[in-house]
Amino acid sequence: MRRLSDAIFQDLPDRLEEILKSVENAILSFEDLFHWNELPNARKCKAFGVDGSRSMEKRCGVVVYAVSSVGVGDRILELHDLSVVEPIKHIEKRVEMHMQTNEARIGIFADGLILLDGALSNLLFLIKRPRITELYDIEKQINDKTMNILKDFANELDEWIDSLNEGISKGLFQRRTLLSRDKDSDLRILFEFVEFLHAYDRLLEKEVVSIAKNVYESRLSMLKNNFEYYRVTDQAVVDYLVAKEFGFEKAGFFKFSYNVRGEESMIADLVKELEFKNIEKLRVYPCYVRFRDYGNVYLMESNVEIEKVLPMVVGLEVDGYPFPLIHAHRYAEIKKAEMKAMMVTLMNALANKPEFRILLKHPRSSLEGH
């Protein structure tokens, strides 16, 4: 077996030095804005951690996927979906949206402070920076007739979701998006997106906190105009500045604000027309936080001011991370394994039927021994 070239091992430290130099250069134009604050005293609260998982099997004629969303607090809430769809475009992104929709719906029926894994600002940027039309050709589907249908659909969602609580509490399997209800793929995506927006609009009636472990799109770059910041991550910059000021990786937080200007966009118009008022008026309050000395730096965001929610989140910290999210993540992973096993069992059983074999043949069977 050939050994890796020594040049590879020599190149890696050189590349790390190059990235570190980028961090140092970025700090020169940012350091005057940075102030690392002491964490507030902990405050007790009732909280729910919400997390999700997804699995997908691509067969010769269909895609089979499962999504699981769980909420963990003083009780456990579950919502699991399993579906078979045609190999439609953007399937990975759409399954992720399905999972996020279910996560929001779990949060609707949870009590107290709702903790999400991820970044709440992604929803804000989605509305203010309309990238979805770059992925999905849905703008052409918006017209007066379609808008009237969408309004009726949003009203039906309101009535339907109020009756969903019992099913979520029991962890029932239910189809919850429109992935296979219409032959027109672009129109179908539009309805899925409305479900996604509706779920988050209802969720935002509550106090919500999101915790992002990885932030590859800089938020700090918004603090200065023409700030060249794309080559390094926010967390690396925060870590560097804290270590430089205090001599070690000190616990604390840095509060800042987003200045996201609204744009004329199809999505903003859609939110307004469908009267998703909680999304329309959404303001996201961000901070970078380290809950324990030498722990990781996380992006924490909320729809209420940081001063109000940070003491509650500090009170939930265990080993440098909010315990409800740790519990929710572990439970979601268990459910992912269960759903994966169920999905494979279902496909293998159906593949024995001659009429389904052409759809369920595994395209990598020769390579993987299926």
Image (cartoon, rainbow, N blue to C red):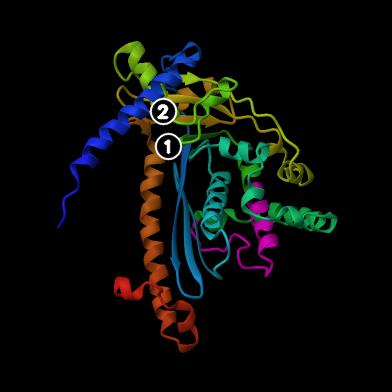
CA separation in Å, label 2 and label 1: 8 Å
What residue sits right under mark 2 in the picture? Answer: 235
- Residue 330 location, x and y as percent? 36, 48
For residue 62, side relative to residue 203 (left or right):
left
Which amino acid is tagged 1? Answer: Asn
| Magenta span of residues | 170-198
**What residue is shown at x 45% (from left), y 15% (from top)?**
28
Is residue 122 rendered to the left or right of residue 58? right
Residue type for callout 2: Gln
Check disc 2: other Cα within 10 Å, few if <14, some if 14-19, many if 20+: many
Please provide percent x and percent y for residue 33: 51, 13
Q: Position of residue 90 (x, y in %)?
A: 56, 58
The answer to whether the residue labelled 2 contacts the one labelled 1, judged by CB atoms less than 8 Å apart, is yes
The percent coordinates of residue 30 (x first, y second) are 49, 16
In what element is the residue under mark 1? loop
Can you tell which mark lies on residue 214? 1
Examine the rendering and report whether any part of residue 172 can be seen. Answer: yes
Is residue 247 found left or right of 60 in the rendered image?
Answer: left
Count of numbered tags: 2
Residue 296 seen in render: no
Q: Residue 186's image quarter?
A: bottom right
Q: Is residue 211 left or right of residue 248?
A: right
Looking at the picture, tell me which residue is in the foreground, 175 or 293. Answer: 293
Residue 1 vs residue 191, the one in the foreground: 1
As helix, strand or loop, the secondary structure at mark 2 comes to helix
- Residue drawn at point x = 45 percent, y = 21 percent: 26
Q: Quadrant of the C terminus?
A: bottom left
Residue 325 magenta: no
